Image (spheres, helix red, strand yellow):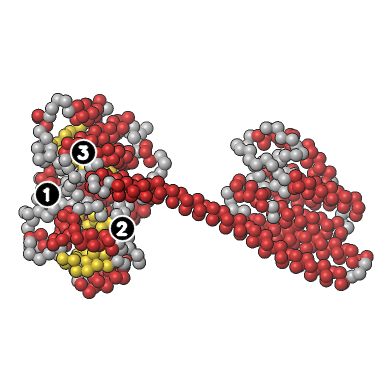
Amino acid sequence: MGRVHSVDDDKTSPSPSFSEGGAVPRVVIVDDHRLFRSGVRGELGDAVEVVGEAGDVDGAVHVIAEKQPDLVLLDVHLPGGGGVEVLRRVLARQPQVRFLALSVSDAAEDVIGIVRGGARGYVTKTISGRELADAIVRVADGDAVFSPRLAGFVLDAFSATDAPPVDPELDRLTQREREVLRHIARGYAYKEVGKELFISVKTVETHVSSVLRKLQLSNRHELSRWATARRLV
Amino acid sequence: MAQAPTHTPRYTRAVDGRLLAGVASGMARHLRVDPVVVRLAFMALSIGGVGVPIYLALYFFVPEEEAPAEEEGPDHQRKGREVSQLIAYTALALGLGLLFLLFGGVFDPLLWFMVFGTLGAVILWQQANPAQRDEWMSTNVVPVGRKALMRAGAGVLLIVVGVIGFLVFQEQLQNARAGLTFAFTIIAGIALVAAPWIIGLVRERDEERRERIRNAERAELAAHIHDSVLHTLTLIQRRADDPREVQRLARVQERALRSWLYQRPADAETTVRPGLERVAAEVEEEHGVPIEVVCVGDCDIDDGLSAVLRAAREAMVNASKYAGADTISVFGEVEEEEVLVFVRDCGVGFDLEQMPEDRMGVRGSILGRMERHGGSARVRTEPGEGTEVQLRMPRIPNL
């Protein structure tokens, strides 16, 4: 298991969070396969409150504006411009909405593209309902969710270049961040990563969020070039 | 391959095509100039009276001398040029000679017009020969569409000029203007009719070719879907009562479809990343436990690394058989100095100290194998804590 990391109990957050019980996140599911939407809805059960669904970009933008969800479960491939287009249009007006990307694609450029577009995590559609619920709660709380595959892509993206970084602050991962990512890629849950590296789960989360930030903000064009140069599964 | 000089073509590799017996195009190839230049030169010489004998002489003698050189070509393709074509070329050559004899003198306008007309007719006729065009298409990847159109246009123009000129010459002897007007109208009409027809032919050919390619792709897709997806779906329906088998079938099909869609390069199996994925796919297929492979970096597989792949395979098999985990995570990392592979499950784990001696898998196939090849392996496990096998192999630097 450990593909997506269960929320930890020693997490201390200043603001009330979904992981500490109480309210469940309000979620909009965006996917062009109706069957898949209802499947996800059924699997999630009571863990979240599904407030809306959409099957294309325009519908998604509309529903999200209307329902103001905590989190949007976003398919990468959508008619009308794809998940990236939804991110672009929604985040311009509703920056507080959080996105978790869900895809069957697994292609590096899709995954990197959607995370750079603003999604705070990426999971594959083969994920189990419980794991998905955990990931949703985590992202709704403002953390990042890295699947092993995404961790692998990111490691690849930040290492596969000979060119010197333009902005070392953004274009390079620290040793610690690399270590965290490598453990995630090996299938370790956040808690297990913390135990391995003798750091708290909170610190692991900080590292992962920092990697997410670098991934989204880095202007290094190698990142996008890398993504398009590879069509790897 | 001794080809008889008169009955079979000498220039089977018609890179620039051939119009007549291949004398001109052969010379063009020899001189590395455009064959059209050589052909026009021959025509010009013919008008002077020297060209025809020269051409005829070359026509009969050159092929025998050039035959060995031609054999150096990598492939001899279509041999059969139509006899009619050959006859037409011969007739043209003889006709030119006769014309010269009949009209004599370079400045005889009738001769000029006849030459133009014949040349144009030959070009046109040659362009409109589908077999010849197909041969061009098959040997010459560079699109000939524009070139063919230009030649067709030039041919039409030359015919018009030639025939009108001929009529003009004739009418000097007989009736003047009515004939000219009449002829011009007819020729213009023929040109108007013929040009679109030729263009249409070329377009039709291109369209047919595209359609053929599309059909081939469609057929391939259909065959693939049928052989793989439909087949698997049928199997799944028949095994609907066995969830594990259904999942296994679905996973295998997903993998196959994915790799087909993303079109792995043919030599992909020679590097670590696809190698690891292939091993994982095989183990997954055998044992039915999903294996997630993540790989960072890549490099060629050498002896040590193929040992790593075998050891990793053994670790995956062990995890599938004994761990009882839902999934197995495999992480491969290619670094500058070494290659690391981690095979991890969140299953039952076991006590390393009390590992039965007969668990040859771990001792022999993993630990021993890695050490023999200059690498190392570590097994981390505890009852209830899952198992992780870590494989480490130094890279031999590329020289």
Residue positioned most to the bottom: A66
At label 1, the amino acid type is Lys
From the viewer's perspective, is residue B102 above or below residue A16? above
Which label lies toward us, 1 or 3?
3
Which label lies toward us, 3 or 2?
3
| Mark pair 3, 2: CA separation | 34 Å
Please give the chain letter of the residue carrying mark 1: A
B242 sits left or right of B91 in the view: left
User: Tag 2: Cα neighbours inside 10 Å, few (<14), some, or many (≥20)?
Assistant: many
A194 sits left or right of B94 in the view: left
At label 3, the amino acid type is Ser
For the residue pair A155 and B225, the one nearer the viewer reads as B225
Dot 1: element: helix
User: Tag 3: Cα neighbours inside 10 Å, few (<14), some, or many (≥20)?
Assistant: many
Q: Position of residue B147 (x, y in %)?
A: 64, 56
Q: Which residue is mark 1?
A: A191
Label at residue A113: 2
> Quadrant of residue B315 in the image?
top left
| Residue plotted at (60% across, 37% down) | B74
